[in-house]
Image (cartoon, rainbow, N blue to C red):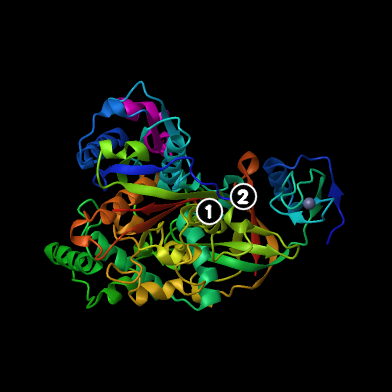
Amino acid sequence: MPKSKSLARGVAIVGAGMSKFGAFSEKNSRDLFVEAFKEMTKSVDKGLDPSVIESLYVGNFSSDQFEHQAHTAPLLADAVGLTPIPATRVEGACASGGLALRQGVMAIASGMYDVVLVGGAERMTGLNTAGVTDALATAADVPFEIPAGFTFPGFYAAMASAYMHRYRMTPEHLMNVAIKNHDNASLNPNAQFGVTIQKWMEGRVAAAIKKGKPAPTWSTIWDFLHDEAGNPTVAWPLRLFDCSPVTDGAAAVLLVAEERMHEFTDHPIHIIGSGQASGSALHDRPELTTIPAAKIAATNAYEMAGVTAKDIRIAEVHDCFTIAEVIATEDLGFFAPGEGFKAAEDGVTARNGAKPINTSGGLKAKGHPVGASGVAQAVEVFKQMRGQAGERQVAGDVNLALTHNVGATGSTCAVHVYERRN
Amino acid sequence: MSEETTTIRPFSAAAFNQYIAEHKLMGTRCTKCSKTYAPPRAICPNCHSEKMEWVETSGKGKLAGFTVIYSGPTFMSEQGFDRKNPYISGIVELEEGTNISARITGIDPLKPSEIKIGTPLNVDFIEFGEGEAKKTYLAFKA
Ligand SMILES: [Zn+2]
């Protein structure tokens, strides 16, 4: 394993914002990025003159397929009035945003720039479900995985099958992750599904009655989650509520060299650890119950930051599927292998638990505009660490946080560690 | 294991698929460290040797992970699979110690909780389409 190096100079986040996540028929990724940029600008405590921004790195998986628009970065830079600064698109499937963030960190640490904008944008709902399935499938090892009929829910379902066999987990355990993340999203005004599963179920019943159809007889959310009519199987053992949605959205963070951070704010969030690793196709791994690239990225990020898993107060992890959150929390060292699935059930990962995970609602309920997700994770920890997360604010001193962003089945992973010092 | 080997074809996805069309599950073996890879590799990730050779695998393996897919990619819908007719995709650990993704047949997809990890499997090939459009897919049968 390559040894983790330290940053040549410190990097801090001084502004962060995101668009509303959802399905927007009248918006393209550029419109969403403009929204995120405006929110980011508003968040800079001492104000931002955009002309100080020297470079843009933007995570985008596939505007080519989703919007029939390639060459995204200069268009996004231009839309927010930043041309002619360099604008670079970074692609790592669903980890595109995390990789863009890392590029921004390295660009500042190297001394090349002092002020860098990192963005992420994806507009996915222009394609129908089959189109989105086929577009996302291009993030797999296409010649060797796709002919087997695999879809992305299918890959993670295969991991879940191996996990269930090895650790005696049941599909019900995974439902606890979905329930928790919907609870968190219900307190996030930017979330795509800002409702608890209880409210969702009640909405379904009310809609049926309104249409004069027989009302479903679900008395608890468990009835609802076990019913094919409420929660259909997508790829066994994963059902609809185990899967993140198809989302349009964008996010932006402003990174600056530490020596200049006080020009922007007196409450910066420092990025003190960054790790990235890659891996093979899912079938080519010795175990299906862990993502090796995530473990390596985490080890490197912890080592650079000089902290351990135990020190991390909150984390935004890549819960593209409920099983992915379970595996993530084990790969990050929060829980021992085979213990992660119990954490949601026991409330350990709840907002008021010992290790709050995905306070934003996660990809699962906040939404997963793939190229934007890694940057939106940084937006959430920025808000939580500064005590600006509103109703979903975690109590106590959130001085250390982590983000974990995975591409495809784990062939790419980026992990970042954040610190608040005052 | 079949002793049939050849060095004529390149170590590519196209060559692998050509073998699949001939109903042969071929891998590449590193002549230096003897590790076998299916899907094939042109460079050995274990010892970085570039001296590889094609070998036909035993075609025997066991189920390492699986799913029953109710909403598949377009090409699977075209083969008649949908919510009422789901199919199994899986990861198979071959006797040779290499893993591969494949369709899984000979097991009831409607009883997924009865499917056991570790189930012994044998290579199989699924053909779809006619004439020029005919495609052969790798499968493993319980
Ligand atoms: Zn070798």
Q: Are marks 1 and 2 on the same chain?
A: yes
Q: Does residue A315 lie above or below A375 as drawn?
A: below
Q: Amino acid at mark 1?
A: Asn
Can you give x and y, in whole percent of width and height, for residue A50 in the image?
Answer: 26, 29
Q: Residue at x 33, y 36 (%)?
A: A260
Q: Does residue A134 lie above or below A360 as drawn?
A: above
Residue A21 visible in this rendered orientation of the protein = yes
Can you give x and y, in whole percent of width and height, for residue A172 in the image?
Answer: 38, 75
Q: Which residue is mark 2?
A: A2
Task: Identify the element where label 1 is drawn.
Answer: helix
> What distance separates the C-alpha of mark 1 from that of mark 2?
9 Å
Nearer to us in this view, A386 or A64: A386
Question: What number is the disc on residue A300?
Answer: 1
- Kindly give the residue lying farthest to the right in the view shown: B3
Q: Where are the magenta residues, as a range?
A: A55-78
Q: Amino acid at mark 2?
A: Pro
Q: Are marks 1 and 2 in contact (CB under 8 Å)?
A: yes
Residue A46 left/right relative to A153: left
Nearer to us in this view, A197 or A39: A39
Quarter of the view holding residue A176: bottom left
